[in-house]
Amino acid sequence: MGLKLSILDQSPISEGTTAEEALAETVKLARHAEKLGYERFWVSEHHDASTLAGSSPEVLMAYLAAKTETIRIGSGGVMLPHYSPYKVAENFRVLEGLAPGRIDAGIGRAPGGMPIASLALNRGEYRQVDRFSEQVDELLTYLAGDEESGPYPGLKATPLVQTVPDVWMLGSSGSSAMLAAQKGLPYTFAQFINGDGGPDYMAAYYSSFQPSCLLSKPKSMAAVFTICAETDEKAEHLASSLDLSLLMTAQGMKSNGVPSPEQAAAYQYSKYERQFIQENRKRMVVGSPRRVREQYEQISEQYKTENIMAVSIMYDFQDKLTSFELLAEAIRT
């Protein structure tokens, strides 16, 4: 099947740079992705993160929509348990009014940060994750303009725009796949978060899918860390900074930003840390254009989807731009 490419950008902050620079690079990347023919450009929600500047996807989406013309702009995603579904619906109705037919509302239930951030977002209370399914129903009711089915009959989510955003369920587990199937929503599996079980979860999504007023048949996407360079050797060199960055995060090590490949080369890895990195490679596609294309075709076959979303964290922004250029060219040829 022909592959359709999208991008999820987390606005990573490289060591020695600032959050302002990271956000500016996200804008540049969105414009570049549009020129290269990417389908979607999503931005993430992370709280209290020293290495990621993307904390408010709806705000960033509005700016990105104003700076682009055709590419779909989305959230990857809004962590719904933190928020009122009514306010989320209003935010996305405004975005849809500003960029009709170009907005994706990606929603998830992960915290997006450490417990202290969740407490701050929820006024000192713990997130009610067990209400996520109910929140999804409420959000869909408001977006659909169904004033009588929600918990507050007669209430409208304004503005009353002519179109509604596409709603995607995001997840990295079997439970999120099943929930997407039950709600009749498109589903994105985050392989860049969980390198195990994705194809099985996606198969369960397909087999359990229940058509809805939003979607008559299953629609899916797989999201994976991707680093593409002119040669396999250079790609491995560039990926080493992501290897070290993920290791530092997992071990709670202090970080001043995404480390350089040179820092990664100088780091003294223990046997355990090398095993951790090897296991983490399940979450990544790394290599030359030919090698990346082969791996993308395998992912497409495993997930039975034509939609693949690339997530890229690199120390040097120009290397990141080149990676997406090579990826687009590799899939087109």
Image (cartoon, rainbow, N blue to C red):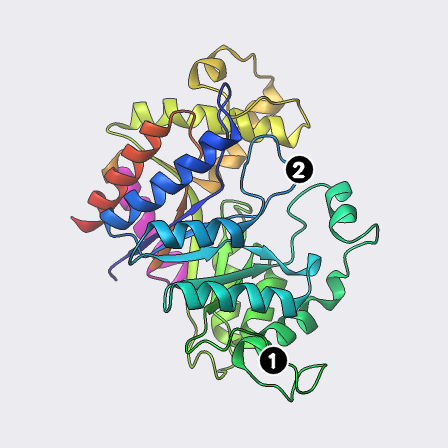
Q: Quadrant of residue 161?
A: bottom left
Residue 242 in the image, given as x and y percentages of width and height: 48, 29
Which residue is found at the position 67% from the left and 28% from the top?
251
Q: Is residue 304 above or below residue 216?
A: above
Which residue is found at the position 60% from the left and 43% from the top?
46
Cβ–Cβ below 8 Å for labels 1 and 2? no
Which residue is found at the position 42% from the left and 82% from the top?
216
Observer-nearest of 293 and 48: 48
Q: Is residue 20 magenta?
A: no
Q: Is residue 19 above or below residue 181?
A: above
Observer-nearest of 121 and 162: 162
Observer-nearest of 323 and 152: 152
Instruction: Identify the disc placed on residue 156.
Output: 1
Q: Secondary structure at mark 1?
A: loop
Three-letter amino acid code at the position of disc 1: Lys
Observer-nearest of 122 and 216: 122
The segment highlighted magenta reads: 291-306
Whether residue 111 sits left or right of residue 195 in the image: it is: right
Does residue 220 appear in this view?
no
Mark 2 lies on residue: 48
Three-letter amino acid code at the position of disc 2: Asp
Residue 137 in the image, given as x and y percentages of width and height: 63, 76
Instruction: Identify the disc placed on residue 309.
Output: none
Residue 27 in the image, given as x and y percentages of width and height: 39, 42
